[in-house]
Image (cartoon, rainbow, N blue to C red):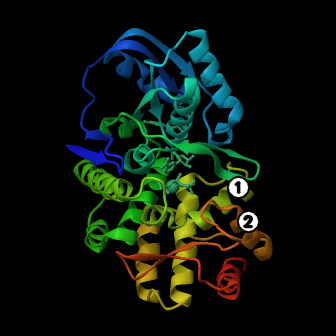
Amino acid sequence: MIVNITLPDNTSYDITIDTLKNMTFDRKVVVVTNPTISALHLDYLTSKIDAKELSVVTIPDGEEYKRMNTIETILEHCFEHKLNRSSLLIAFGGGVIGDMTGFAASIYQRGIDFIQIPTTLLSQVDASVGGKTGINNKYGKNLIGAFYQPIAVNIDPHFLTTLPKREFGAGIAEIVKMAVTFNSDFFKWLEENDLNDEENIKVAIAKSVETKAWVVSQDEKERGLRAALNYGHTFGHVIENETNYDTYLHGEAVGIGMTMANALAVKIGYMTQEDSNRVTALLEKYDIPTTYNIKDVEDFYEHFFLDKKSLDNKIKFIVPKGIGDCEITANISKEDVIEVLKGFNS
Ligand SMILES: NC(=O)c1ccc[n+]([C@@H]2O[C@H](COP(=O)([O-])OP(=O)(O)OC[C@H]3O[C@@H](n4cnc5c(N)ncnc54)[C@H](O)[C@@H]3O)[C@@H](O)[C@H]2O)c1
Ligand SMILES: O=C(O)C(=O)C[C@@H](O)[C@H](O)[C@H](O)COP(=O)(O)O
Ligand SMILES: [Zn+2]
């Protein structure tokens, strides 16, 4: 299956969901990956690539390495192998590899092409599509980066056969996000079908990619609609940052964050408690965490001001309106938010 994404400036690329095909490149290619993926799947990938010159840069595995000095490692490899402006980077891994490879591609000699070959469920349904690239720093998550689109995304569900169960759950959190914010039928389908089934997961990948491509094609740079894809993230990013990126997987923090956003939606009358419970039940079916102990509610709230969606000292929240719709709003009172946060520090 191929999903095409055409951006507001008319550039476009294909997202192919299928077994990886042979690829021929009349240019230098660098594959960016980590030791975990390399041990499992690098031979398979390189057997599919015929390039003018092929090299591999292996960076450490983990969200805590999604930072500037790892970008330096990737760039140094590019310089050592004399990549030029017609060269190509291939991101081969999960969202961490994808975000960093895209960012490195965006700044190497002011920008070279890159392709996404995502190997986690989360990166197949979300991170590989749409061109958000970047890294974390001590101030917060993804605060440095660029909107920089890949020239192609090749999703091979076969890679998921080696993915640990916890990572699979983290990917499901982002699938649930797409359904709650945009598609009630998809949500009902998720309630009724088991994503551990090989055919069902392909359907869910395709549905999620179609949803994301539809959003990004209208609002590449997150001026409006795209912010809906941040549902659960305003809270989730604070959780990731205050637990040093080593306690929760990104998708897990988003799972907790969606539960918090739902509590806010219930408080302001946008969502029934029953619908909020349905989302929690779906997350818990895949062992995605939905509880968290906020130690300092005021401190947690203050962190929202570093969120990229915050403008003019106003925090933007993505609040579901029932299931299948949402509102992006900066008009929620601090009192309401604090009340909700207090429900998570018992
Ligand atoms: N750019 C975007 O639009 C976007 C969207 C969502 C998330 N993200 C970012 O993506 C990151 C999370 O991505 P992730 O969940 O893929 O995490 P990840 O990249 O850390 O990968 C998770 C783990 O799975 C391992 N792994 C990867 N593929 C495997 C496979 N096939 N078999 C076995 N193990 C495998 C990795 O080595 C890693 O240990 C976060 O940094 C998040 O901010 C970006
Ligand atoms: O593509 C988007 O837009 C998203 O928000 C997708 C999110 O799942 C992803 O985690 C993204 O990196 C968060 O964006 P950020 O701009 O808040 O860093
Ligand atoms: Zn995310």
Q: Residues within 10 Å of mark 1 (few under 14, many from 20)?
A: many
Location of residue 29 by image quarter: top left
Which residue: 66% across, 74% down? 314
- The outermost residue toward the left is 1
Q: Nearer the viewer, mark 1 or mark 2?
A: 2
Numbered tag placed on residue 241 in the rendering: 1
Amino acid at pointer 1? Asn
Question: Along the line of sight, which residue is nearer the eye, 139 or 297?
Answer: 139
Amino acid at pointer 2? His
Which secondary structure lies at badge 1?
helix
Cβ atoms under marks 1 and 2 closer than 8 Å: yes
* Residue 271, horizontal then vertical, whole percent: 45, 86
Residue 138 vertical position relative to residue 59 in the rendered view, above or below: below
Q: Is residue 235 left or right of residue 149?
A: right
Residue 167 vertical position relative to residue 186 in the rendered view, above or below: above
Task: State the quadrant of the C terminus.
Answer: bottom right
- The outermost residue toward the front is 9
Q: Return the residue at label 2.
A: 303
Q: Cβ(mark 2) to ligand 2 < 8 Å?
A: no
Q: Is residue 218 left or right of residue 82?
A: left
Question: Along the line of sight, which residue is nearer the eye, 245 or 79?
Answer: 79
